[in-house]
Amino acid sequence: MAQGFVRLGVNIDHVATVRNARGGRHPDPLRAAELALAAGADGITAHLREDRRHIGDADIDALSELCRTRGKPLNLEMAVTDEMLAIALAHRPHAACLVPERREEVTTEGGLDVARHHLVVAPVVRRLRDAGIRVSLFIDPDPVQVAVAEAIGAQVIELHTGAWCEAAREGAGQAELEALRRAASDGAGRGLEIHAGHGLDYETVGAVAALPEVRELNIGHFLIGEAIFTGLESAIRGMRERIDAARPLGSAS
């Protein structure tokens, strides 16, 4: 079995989705972030989309201050645009994860095609790195994408686990899991830190957490949904237990 500690980043976007459904201030994503950290989350993830459909600019202000105060990382998910680059450079989060974004999508539908768009992505990677921000690229588990991510200077790749999760729920998924395994091994061999996320729940997280190269999982939608029934602290602790079960005898590094 794989050894070593796997960090859990909790994405609190969909607390803001519920808030925005009626307007006003409740439920407050900042409170969710505070509860997540108290429950054992290793960091907070938030996606500031161009259309501001959930997390807003004021949320990023508040989350940045909270994470600085608590000494915990804020992972800002962002599109590769001048506007988002300026926001990242102003806030200086611990990490910025570059993701694809389409206005009409319900959620992120796949990885960023860094091979096709490397001429656009590479300068943003460089600007962020020069500002001391750790740069992650959210990509599909494809060997070409992994190689280009290394070539343009990313420090981290976050592997898109959506295809694995969908297939696993249908009783399949071996091909998708093998693709994740190969990409994780390839990326780590290239000196990249390996993260993973999208669509993970209690049933699917173990197989991904068990991949020995994976250092961090970012999970949001399932945890916020589960919190309706069990509370956020219980949902996060349940996820932490399943991750740790897949990586026994782990120690933080």
Image (spheres, helix red, strand yellow):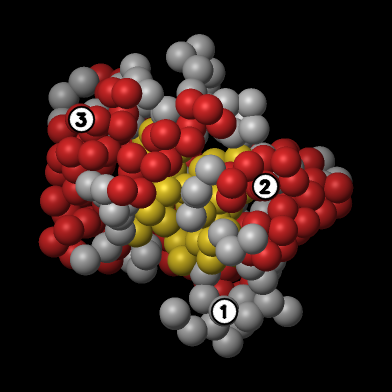
In the foreground, 57 or 130: 130
User: Quarter-wise, where is residue 84 in the image?
Assistant: top left
Image coordinates for residue 30, horizontal then vertical, percent: 21, 46
Q: Identity of the amino acid at label 3? A: Asp
In this rendering, position of residue 105 left or right of residue 168? left
**CA–CA distance between discs 1 and 3?**
36 Å
Q: Identity of the amino acid at label 1? A: Gly
The total number of labels drawn is 3
- Residues tagged 2 and 3 counted as in contact (Cβ below 8 A): no
Residue 76: in sight, yes or no?
Answer: no
Q: Quadrant of the C terminus?
A: bottom left
The residue lying at 21 percent from left, 20 percent from top is 23
- Dot 2 or dot 1, earlier in sequence: 1
Which residue lies under the disc numbered 2?
Answer: 147
The residue lying at 34 percent from left, 17 percent from top is 51
Residue 159 versus residue 205 in the image, above or below: above
In the foreground, 146 or 43: 146
**Helix, strand or loop status at disc 3:** helix
Residue 14 versus residue 203 in the image, above or below: above
**CA–CA distance between discs 2 and 3?**
33 Å
Which residue lies under the disc numbered 3?
Answer: 57
In this rendering, position of residue 49 left or right of residue 137? left
Image coordinates for residue 69, horizontal then vertical, percent: 13, 61
Residue 21 versus residue 176 in the image, above or below: above
Which residue lies under the disc numbered 1?
Answer: 4
Crowd tier of the residue under label 1, counting other residues whose Cα lies within 10 Å: few below 14, some 14–19, many 20 or above: some
